[in-house]
Amino acid sequence: MKRFFQSLQARYMAIILVALFLFQAAYLLVAMLAMGLQEDISGEQNQNETDPKQIEEKWHADAKALKNSSRETISSLFAEWKKTYPDASMFWVDEMGNLMEQRDVKGNLPAQWTPAYTAKFIKERYGGDPFTVISFIGGDEKNGFIVLEIPRNLFLPPMVKVAEKYGIFLGAGLLLIITLFIIVSFLFFRGIRKRLLHLQEAMERRDMDSLPIGIDVQKNDEIGQLEKTFNEMVEELKESKQREQEEEQLRRELIANLSHDLRTPLTKINAHTYSIGKEDLSPEGKQAVKALETSIVNIDRLIENLMSYTLLMASKHKQELTELDAVRFVRENMASWYPVFEKEGFEVNIELEPFKKKWQADPMWLGRIFDNILQNVLRHAKDGLYLEVATVSTEECDAIVFIDHGKGLKNSSNEKGAGIGLSIVDMMVKGMKLEWDIDSGDSGTVIKIIRKTLGAAS
């Protein structure tokens, strides 16, 4: 229970309960005021004076009682009604359609009333606001007619009138309560936000190991519990980071030792294979020696990739960016690879157009990227026996494109590896702030090495 009363939920519930109490108190006060004023208004007003039916009957009766349609009698009638209904407006139109008399009429009335305008006027006023009554003088249409117009708010119940009259005070009181509630809620949530931002800043701060730094716990509410959990997480991360560093060091040492230990016997195997190849062998023996030499080359390449991958993961692979002619670099690289593909029976199509600008790249890294891509073509695209190397330039980018007609990377292959070569391509491309795209399907694979031009959207 103590923990609940210390929580943010309990504090905000207290704010809501106080606000509800103030709302109820305000409504009770206004209701008491309204009841007292309603009795006063009800006592002052005659019910007949606010009944539309009674008003209409009385107006018809007064109009019928007029003996003549002189200006004096009409003005006297209008004055009598104005005493009872100060907000009323009245006017008189004689039998010839002339506007003869008007009293407090809002808007402009025509001096001459035609039957069409009279019909339009009756249609617009019927059932509308103001409440309108039209009566013939002396009960005969030949004497002209008089019109009474009263605002319909006169017929509203006393309670509604009280609300209209004193509603501003009620609104002001409720607005004050709502404003206080908003201010208190704002201060409450601002305090929460401040503590959360403080926690966020603590999460963004890093020590020398790039780990978050612990935070001081000030309160025992939900955010305080979150801060405690965050501190526990920081401690777990530090322990995990230490274990990871120890494991990473062991892994690097293991890979370095394995690479060294594997290359020593591999060199001996290569030497013995060369010696065996010089002997007088049968065709089957020569073919076996050739296969053995190919396997040795593949193993050496895999060891080299494994070492490069380890160095890249540890961010220790040396990089020296320089300005170079990428198209010329591709042409020279393909010149060294062309005999290899020609030996394997590939149709090689090279279409290189110069780029407008030079690339910022590491020649060693870029060469390794091209080598891994071309080795990938040899391993996976032997069925298609086709390789195309081309350049593409647009306003947004320059690209070097490698296209083969193999079965695609997703299909099984006898030469399928662990994908370290393409992983190295990915890390080296991103390390030089380039981009790459690969699209592989049953009809072949397209790999693009892309350099965004200046001003292009990233």
Image (cartoon, rainbow, N blue to C red):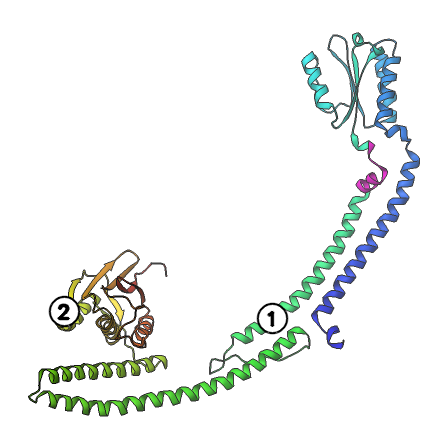
- Quadrant of the frame with the C terminus: bottom left
Q: Are marks 1 and 2 in contact (CB under 8 Å)?
A: no
Across and down, in percent, residue 186 comes to 67, 62
Give me the C-alpha separation between circle 1 and circle 2: 66 Å
Q: Is residue 277 magenta?
A: no
SS category of the residue bearing label 2: loop
- Quadrant of the frame with the N terminus: bottom right
Q: Is residue 157 magenta?
A: yes
Q: Is residue 82 visible?
A: no
Residue with the mark numbered 2:
345
Work out whether 367 lies above or below 65. below
Residue with the mark numbered 1:
196
Numbered badge on residue 41: none
In the rendered view, does 12 fall on the left or right side of 69? left
Q: Residue at x 70, y 58 (%)?
A: 182
Among the 4 quarters of the image, the one containing residue 100: top right
Across and down, in percent, residue 189 comes to 66, 65
The three-letter amino acid code for the residue at tag 2 is: Gly
Work out whether 103 lies above or below 413. above
Question: In front: 190, or 398?
Answer: 398
Q: Residue at x 85, y 38 (%)?
A: 158
**Tag 1: Cα neighbours inside 10 Å, few (<14), some, or many (≥20)?**
some
Which callout, 1 or 2, points to the residue nearer the camera? Answer: 2
- Give the magenta part as a residue range: 155-165
Across and down, in percent, residue 99 comes to 74, 13
Across and down, in percent, residue 298 comes to 22, 81
The three-letter amino acid code for the residue at tag 1 is: Leu
